[in-house]
Image (tube, helix red, strand yellow):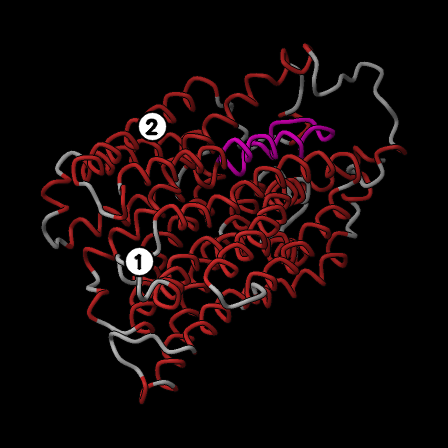
């Protein structure tokens, strides 16, 4: 019965429930991107509120900024591993609901953050961001696995890519919410606003920005209506009731290493290398703000507005188009070619901005901003999307969520190293031109290494059913 249902799904035409599943499975990724990209404007507001009288006026120390990002990355690593394993043992639907609820509650906590003194706010924000990371980490393997098991083999890549493209909408939403909140509070505080004084209302503005992501998760209430489709009644919702294959083997075994070891190595290492570059580029935005947006000659709300506006332009011009290029092309030219192309183009762009960085870093140059935006375009029309897709297609159903979680966790380990690299390049909150140029060139080398590993070890899954992909080699 199960195999007949799987065959029917592989041959099924696109239907309404596919699009509903894309929206619902993508809500966690929407929140993930909202959380990552609302952090820069929130940090600007927090710098104005809590660091107004520090020596480096209005600037949050890089160590504090990295800690705020590091807490969510640590939570994400743990969440991907734990929820990935639970998704295979307890069923995708049940565990997915738990991860979404964790994101809802922790996002509310991030907005309230208990108190108003600097130390208390930052500590409580870090704690709630850790739990938010747990929920986000759980969403990665579960949403990818759910969608891979939901779609037919001819459109599976486009559907999973569409789920992942919800990140783009999260980036756009975080920036637009920040702009609206900033202008609203600026208008309300216009009489008592100046460039050198931060009104108390600014402490409310960043909390509102952090809380809005909770609204997007209301769509998760519809989850059960979609996940009741028959595929989930045969795909590990109750593993104990499924017949056991006498030739099956556990995850930790020589047989697994022989059959799937290279696949897991490929998925984990390419995701690790991608996130080193991707998260470094995201953090690098703070240096671009400092050098190109003239933030020091403006009031608190206008400063946050400028940062969010820049993020909006990057999202509209580069980030979101990159996602949708992948949606359109992935089932036409394949995962492996897109991943190799993306790594190669990212590497070339990093070399183009890193080798002559002394020139770029000492001149306001629109060409630099264009090249910087291209790193996001080719990340999303490339490995940032494909590394999310391939682990959901390569492994047997009983290991699928776990192996996706392991691969994603390695990616977030790479993000942590990217954070450390950014701190080294901007030591003491001041950009060092030589170090930043070296860091950018190093990212180019990392991307070329990712391309080489993709060519050598990544299998093409395009046009093949999940059962064909997981056959023993």
Number of marks: 2
Q: Secondary structure at mark 1?
A: loop
User: Which span is picked out in magenta?
Assistant: 387-411
Q: Secondary structure at mark 2?
A: helix
Q: Which mark is residue 59?
A: 1
Residue 446: image quadrant is top left
Rendering coords of residue 263 (x, y %): 56, 21
Mark 1 or mark 2, earlier in chain = 1
Up/down of 355 relative to 211, above or below: above
Quadrant placement of the C terminus: top right
* Within-10-Å neighbours for mark 2: few <14, some 14–19, many 20+: many
Rendering coords of residue 118 (x, y %): 45, 62
User: In the current view of this chain or complex, which residue is farthest to the bottom?
Assistant: 191
x 70%, y 48%: residue: 96
Q: Is residue 391 magenta?
A: yes
Q: Is residue 406 magenta?
A: yes
Judged by depth in the image, the label closer to the viewer, 1 or 2, is 1
Q: Which residue is mark 2?
A: 446
Q: Is residue 129 left or right of residue 274?
A: right
x 48%, y 37%: residue: 386
Rendering coords of residue 303 (x, y %): 29, 68
Up/down of 327 relative to 239, above or below: below
Q: Is residue 369 left or right of residue 246?
A: left
Q: Nearer the viewer, residue 292 or 401?
A: 292
* Within-10-Å neighbours for mark 1: few <14, some 14–19, many 20+: some
Q: Provide the major secondary structure of the magenta segment.
A: helix
């Amino acid at each position: 019965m199960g195999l007949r249902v799987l065959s029917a799904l592989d041959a099924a035409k696109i239907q309404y429930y596919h699009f509903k599943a894309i929206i619902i499975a993508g809500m966690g990724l929407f929140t993930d991107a909202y959380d990552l990209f609302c952090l820069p404007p929130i940090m600007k507001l927090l710098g104005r509120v809590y660091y107004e009288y520090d020596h480096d006026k209005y600037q949050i120390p890089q160590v504090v900024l990295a800690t705020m990002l590091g807490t969510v990355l640590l939570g994400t690593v743990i969440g991907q591993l734990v929820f990935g394993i639970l998704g295979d043992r307890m069923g995708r639907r049940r565990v997915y609901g738990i991860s979404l609820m964790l994101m809802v509650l922790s996002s509310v906590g991030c907005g309230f953050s208990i108190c108003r003194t600097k130390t208390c706010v930052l500590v409580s924000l870090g704690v709630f961001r850790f739990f938010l990371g747990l929920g986000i980490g759980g969403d990665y393997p579960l949403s990818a696995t759910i969608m891979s098991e939901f779609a037919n083999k001819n459109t599976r890549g486009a559907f999973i890519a569409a789920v992942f493209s919800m990140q783009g909408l999260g980036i756009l939403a975080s920036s637009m919410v920040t702009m609206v909140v900033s202008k609203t509070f600026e208008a309300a505080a216009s009489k008592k606003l100046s460039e050198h004084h931060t009104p108390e209302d600014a402490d409310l503005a960043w909390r509102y920005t952090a809380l809005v992501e909770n609204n997007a998760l209301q769509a998760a209430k519809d989850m059960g209506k979609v996940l009741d489709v028959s595929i989930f009644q045969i795909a590990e919702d109750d593993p104990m009731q499924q017949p056991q294959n006498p030739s099956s083997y556990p995850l930790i075994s020589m047989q697994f290493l022989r059959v799937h070891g290279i696949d897991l190595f490929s998925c984990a290492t390419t995701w690790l290398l991608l996130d080193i570059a991707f998260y470094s580029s995201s953090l690098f935005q703070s240096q671009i703000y400092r050098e190109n947006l003239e933030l020091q000659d403006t009031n608190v709300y206008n400063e946050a507005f400028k940062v969010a506006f820049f993020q909006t332009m990057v999202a509209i011009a580069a980030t979101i188009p990159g996602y949708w290029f992948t949606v359109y092309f992935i089932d036409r030219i394949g995962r492996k070619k897109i991943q190799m192309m993306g790594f190669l183009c990212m590497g070339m762009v990093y070399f183009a901005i890193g080798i002559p960085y002394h020139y770029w870093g000492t001149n306001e140059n629109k060409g630099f901003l264009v090249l910087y935006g291209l790193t996001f375009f080719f990340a999303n029309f490339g490995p940032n999307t494909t590394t999310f897709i391939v682990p959901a297609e390569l492994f047997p159903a009983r290991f699928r969520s776990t192996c996706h979680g392991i691969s994603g966790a390695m990616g977030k380990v790479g993000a942590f190293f990217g954070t450390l690299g950014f701190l080294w390049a901007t030591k003491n909150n001041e950009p060092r031109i030589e170090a930043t140029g070296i860091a950018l060139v190093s990212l180019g080398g990392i991307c070329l290494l990712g391309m080489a590993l993709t060519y050598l070890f990544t299998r093409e899954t395009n046009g093949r059913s999940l059962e064909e992909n997981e056959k023993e080699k």
